[in-house]
Amino acid sequence: MPKLKTNKSVAKRFRLTKSGKIKKRSARRGHLLGKMSRKAKRKLRQSSYVAGVDAKKIRRLLPYG
């Protein structure tokens, strides 16, 4: 059976942790940040984890982690 291909767009955006969770960067960081409060922008710097429902789909696109 041939090797499975990794989806490169998903590989750029998500990282698999040792515990098996999928880590992601916060959204809404592109532009139009002037109207956002300093605190809100600071909170966006933190990364978060993908919800369980979506994690299953992402894992399928990252066959080798």
Image (cartoon, grey):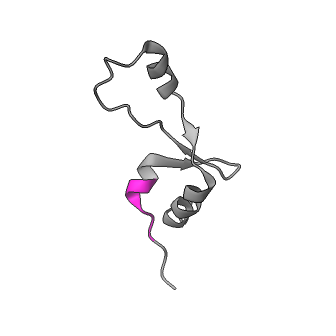
- Residue at the image point whose x is 42% and y is 37% from the top: 27
Position of 28 compared to 48: left or right? left
What residue do we see at 33% from left, 22% from top? 33
Residue lying furthest left in this view?
32
Q: Residue 9: image x %, image y %? A: 38, 55
Q: State yes or no: residue 50 in magenta.
A: no
When asked about the image quadrant of residue 10, the answer is bottom left
Looking at the rendering, the stretch of residues picked out in magenta corresponds to: 5-10
| Residue closest to the far right | 19
Q: Residue at x 52, y 86 (%)?
A: 1
Q: How many marks?
A: 0
Work out which residue is located at the far front of the displayed protein and give it: 35
Residue 24 at what x, y percent from top left? Answer: 51, 43
In the rendered structure, the answer to whether residue 52 lies left or right of residue 58 reads right
Whether residue 61 is situated above or below residue 27 in the rendered picture: below
Name the residue rendered at 45%, 64% in the picture. 6
- In percent of width and height, residue 8 lies at 39, 58
Q: Is 45 drawn above or below residue 55 in the view shown?
A: above
Farthest residue, direction bottom: 1
- Residue 36, above or below 25: above
Residue 52 is situated, as x and y percent measured from the top left of the image, at: 63, 55
In the picture, which quadrant includes the C terminus? bottom right
